[in-house]
Amino acid sequence: EHINNQTTSTRLSWRPIRYNMGTNLVNEKAKEQMIEQSGVEDNQELHRCFNNQRCLKSINTSTIRKRRRCSKLLNALVGMAITSHVFQIPERMSAHAFLNQRNGPRPWGLSQEKPCWRIRKSGYSGVFVPSYYSTLDDFDKPLSDRLSFYSYNLQKHRSQRNTKTAKSFSYFLRDNPITDAQNDSDLPSNLTRALILATRTAGEVGDYRLILHLIESSVKFANGNPILSPRIFGEALNSLSQTKANASKLKRIWTLATSNEAILARPLTAFELNTFMKALAKLGRIRSSIDVLLQHTDESNEKVHIIPDAYTASTLFTALRDSISADQKQEKELASQSRRTDSTLQSRLKVVSRSPAWQWNTAVDLLHIFDFEDFHWNNQAYSTLLKLHEKAAAIFPEHINGSEITIAILDDMSQKNVLPDEMSCSLVVKCIGDPSGNRMAWKNSIDFLRRMSKEEALPLPNVFAYSAAIVACARCSEYEVALELLEEMRAGTIAQLDSTAHASTIPAPNTWVYNAVLLAINDQKKYRRRHNPARKVSRPTKGRVELAMQLFEQMKSDCESGSENLRPDTVTYNMVLSIMGTENPPPEVSLIALLDEMIQNGTPRDAITYRNAILASPSGKRTRRLLLRCLDDDLLLSRSLETLQGKAANAMTFIFNGALSTAASRRSLKDFTNAFSLMQERNIEPSDDTTSHIISIVGKSGNSNLLPKLLSALNEDVSFVEFKSELLTATGISLGQHWLPQLSDTHYHEATTACLDDNNIADAHRAFGAMKNKGIVPHSGYAEDFAVAYARAARNIIRGEKDLVHQTANMSPKQLAQNAYRIAAAITGPSPSTLKVVATSCAMTEQWGMAQKLLRSVQKMVVSESERLLNTKEILCDLQSSLLRECAHQGNVTAALWFVNDIQHFAATQIHPNNSKVVPTEHDLEGMPHSVTNEMSLEHTGVHMRPTNWVSLVKAARKSGHWRVCVNTLQFLRPYVVKTNPSYYGTEDEKLQWKKYKKLVPALVHATACLEIRSQYAWALRAIMDWISWSGRRAPPQAVLSVIRVLSARGRGEEVKDLLAETVHHPSILGNTEDGEGQEEMLYSGACTALHRNGLYDDADEIYVSGVSNGYLGFSFRPGDEAMVLDLHGLNVALAHSAVRVAMRQLTTMPKGQKKSDMMIITGRGRNSAFHLRPVLRPEIQRMLLEEFYPPLNTVSVPGNMGALLVNADDIYRWQEHQEGQKGLRMLAVAAAIKDLSSSRLRKSIVLSMEANKENKKAHD
């Protein structure tokens, strides 16, 4: 009655019945309403209807205030009465439900919302009446059916992200352990399904506690019976990885799985291992993941041994790839804990690769785990291994031999009969074109792309494969090939396909492909230096902006024609802006116009867009305009936050730092202060890069002395106000006291480096001291920077490049080089580039012993540091060349022979490590060479004596006068000269061979010059003849002239003529002209001069006549109006002498009856002489006519022409008569000699002479 009187309203809904004792009580009125609405008269029929619908109507009365005098027992009894009366449930069940609310069994605990068999502290308890069981007989149904009902409700509530059913299920499992599962065959499968649904539901809402409770309850529920599937633990680990659970929670689940083998229906599989490894790797516990793999794949582990599958390898490689970062240390490789049995792939990768990324080394070392007969590789495993290699190569330039690694993986796929899919082929195309160590690797990408089109076993190339090939071309700076691939995609035909190609259609290019081509056109220096350190100079950028703009316009026109997949996106505009910044002066296309076009087309702008535009800006005014424009762009911030990461995510700071960087690189204080002031006005948050740019501009503007004060002021060690005024006066930068972020270790290093770059060593020491005072531990890079600075200062003083008196404390170059050597020697593991700079400075200051020690240190690095082998070899070769060039410059052949000895010995040990023989030694070079053929065998080592090094040795020997070293060094150059012979290569290599030959020519020039000085005419002539036979070309004219001079000095005119004829007979390599005149003219002129200076006038005249007849020399002797005219313009003294003598001889051949005439000799006024208007030929010709002709020929000046001499006809006539008389006397002398040959007196004298010679020979024997 009391309850009926207090009831004011009722509410019916289709939900589980819930009785809250003491507050919501069911009355008879509510019961009548329920039966009335259901249309069922019988209670049993009502229950059957509810069971079919799997739900019950919920009857809730209005809330009435709980009365304090109502006890808990009364509430329980009332609830029992109502339950029994409404639903006809036996009283023993009702009593059991209410009196055993905590510890008793709950057979109808399959509640749909939450467990409620508890009497709460508030004084009431909630009860779920099960809809599946209505009578006592229903509770005797199999347990698997109850689990199926749980699965149904879990699936139903999963979409609602409701975990009440999962929690109820967890409690049900915990409190109802089974005793015998053999009678229920469906129990394991139903339990697995319910647990999987429950753990997935908990994982989706992030409730890791519920997942742990579910697994622990399932273990209790199993009660030692093998009913739990291993997949349950895998699903639990996967669900835990979606929550905030730490690694200890994951290990807790794994421990339950591995330590309770009795409850598992079957052993753990690779699925659970893969899931556990993936979950650990997701938390950054990659090493723990590897330890788990090693532990459970070890055959010696008898407790839990898991056989890995291809997805285990894929999981491992993916985890290693994701853990690679640019800021990680180059750690040591991870040692395997199990016995190694190297597979074919593992052994090949170990040979060709050793990376500074420990992740790649670990992957290679762990390949032995997957080397057993039943292991089957698949495309996914190979693809993840390729992705790991790709990322390691992208972050670490020292990760070399990318093409060889990819080829090894591809060969292993072929051996294991794994046909690459489209993804694998695209990765192969991308990785096989890795330029590290091989700048021609792009050809490998193109070749594999062609194989995809020809071989039916490979998939057809898609857009990703073409994009990968174009990116490979971009890495190797082959933008022409990238353009050809783009045109091939546009044309839709494959070039040079044979009949074996299967029918295919080339994919049409999209925006991604165009962006890759633009990347190839970009060709930034920093990109090439990162992937190929050996190439230091970028190719010219002229015309690339035009190409980029043509592609850009082509994209827009194709897009307007209906190709929506060619619409330029943000990356396209960013790339075009970046390319525009590579040309100086900037292109005509306005940067502002491109930005306006992006706004008009609705293309989003990000921070990179404005930064690239600023970097391409030609002036500070345009930079400021771009900065103001980006400040007004409303979509910039949201776009940058959505798509960019790292520094670019903070858009405004990133853009303004770009403006500061541009101004600092231009050393423009005005542009820097304008951008910096605008940054302060608009309250743009500074970053560490902002401080770095301030340090850079202060150092580059010649104010490096302010950097130590800047560091102290920012640390508040000195008065900031005083320093602010000093900085403002010197640079115009107004700096706020607390505006910049706190100094980091990098800023100290940058300040020190800026001082060293400015050769301000004193202030660099102060900045270094400030860093140490702050407790910052310097790394070895600081010491290397100081060593390089000292070495660079010594070099600059010697070369006179910069006045460093005030910067180096008046130290001499030798003292600076010594300091650099001491610092480098004290460093543990210095870089080879540092040792190279220091060794060069030691050589420049003639400290050869120090330079030799540093050279040997770099040689040891080549042997020990395999991961940096290529780069160290290049540095070693550069160092060898630098040292030998310095020896040649100073003419120190002794030091040069030291270095050659070390270089050849080291190259020989690379082939035969136990060979202690030195090839060649100093005595080998001074004497006859004994092993010239060994030189070419050392070439493949990469650290041998290069041809230019041998040239430097010859130059040093020439300056020192060691002609034997010169002669024997030419023998070591012989193989290189022979390789340039035209008979050994085709016409396509002609230009390349010409360039190589020109580099070898100075060796012969220096050698013949040394032989000329030492008057070794026989060796000089032999060197020229050997060179001609080796090269198949004409010897260089300088070398030939040296030999001609030494032969002339020995009076061997006939040999001079033979050498000249042999030289002119062969083709030239140096072109038609050299030094402004033809080579033939140079040779004939030089020969005449050499013979003339040594008094061999007749031989000089013969060579002059030969040169005139062949058209190499000029001779102008013609009849004039009143006299014969001989023009000597353009001739030197020797040629002028020969020309006059030849002209006089021609006069003697004129008929006697011809009228006598004067001869005019035009010598010039001396306008082209060394001293203006002081002629050289005029006095020489006058002297020659008076002293060398008999009777002497007198000359007179031509009136009005001081550049001509006139010889009288009578004097010429008398000279001719004298010559005829001398000719007659010579003929008489010849007749007398012939007469003596027929007389007995001459015959007897010849016989006596022969007998005397025989006797002398016998006495000598």
Image (tube, rainbow, N blue to C red):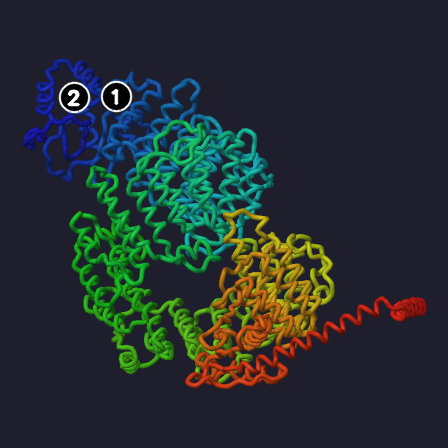
Screen quadrant of the C terminus: bottom right
Where does residue 848 sit, x and y in percent of width and height? Answer: 62, 73
Image position of 446 with respect to 548: above or below:
above
Identity of the residue furthest to the front in this view: 1153
Measuring 29% from the left and 16% from the top, which residue is drawn there?
A: 137
- Residue depicted at 56% across the width and 76% down the height: 1140
Which amino acid is tagged 1? Tyr
Residue 753, image quadrant: bottom left
Q: Say which amino acid is labelled 2.
A: Val
Can see residue 387?
Answer: yes
Given residues 870 and 679, the one toward you in this image is: 870
Q: Residue at x 22, y 43 (%)?
A: 557
Image spot of residue 471 (x, y percent): 38, 46
Which of the numbered marks, if any, corresponds to residue 132? Answer: 1
Indicate which disc, 2 or 1, sits on the residue closer to the N terminus: 2
Marker disc for residue 86:
2
Which numbered marker is on residue 999?
none
